[in-house]
Image: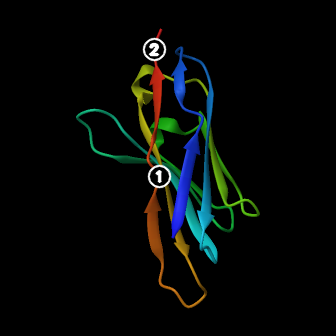
Amino acid sequence: QVQLVESGGGLVQPGGSLRLSCAASGSIFSIITMAWHRQAPGLQRELVAAITSDGSTNYADSVKGRFTISRDNAKNTVHLQMNSLKPEDTAVYLCNVELKMFYWSRLQGYWGQGTQVTVSS
């Protein structure tokens, strides 16, 4: 089994910063992609940022230049540094990983429980 533990959400004023972290543990052979998604009330879940095992990154247009995703492969951890936060960034942020539990396993996806980010004055 694989567990994802997220941390770092909270309430911040517009223009402020937050850093989210997600640590994966359990039966893990290799993690291919680590990503953050978000879901606001009444809206579809959207990809915020993703990073592959070789360090390639992908960002939603709405967060480019403000958010930075990074990962620590030795600790199976992914971070999302969020700067210049806006009220429209308010959402539940969910960690997602695609990994192989063993070298012969197929690729599987796992989701964290989510952490609330609220941007408000």
Q: Is residue 110 left or right of residue 70?
A: left
Residue under label 1: 112
Above/below status of 7 relative to 108:
above
CB within 8 Å, label 1 to label 2: no
Q: Which residue is mark 2?
A: 120
Outermost residue, left side = 42
Question: What color scheme is it?
Answer: rainbow
The residue that appears at 56% across and 91% down in the rendered structure is 104
Where 19 sits versus 85, above or below? below
User: At 45% from the left edge and 36% from the top edge, which residue is drawn?
Assistant: 62
Q: Quadrant location of residue 57?
A: bottom right
Q: Could you tell me which residue is drawn at 76 percent across and 63 percent down?
A: 74
Question: Disc 2 marks which amino acid?
Answer: Ser
Q: Which residue occupies the extreme bottom position in the image?
A: 104
Give the residue type that dot 1 points to.
Gly
Q: Is residue 8 left or right of residue 107?
A: right
- Foreground pick, 91 / 46: 91
Percent position (x, y) of residue 52?
A: 61, 64
- Name the residue at 64% across, 52% down: 78
Above or below, 67 against 47 in this view is above
Residue 53: x %, y % from top left: 65, 67
Residue 72 or residue 50, whichever sits in front: 72
Relative vertical location of residue 22 with respect to residue 3 in this rendering, above or below? above
Position in image of residue 82 (x %, y %)? 60, 33
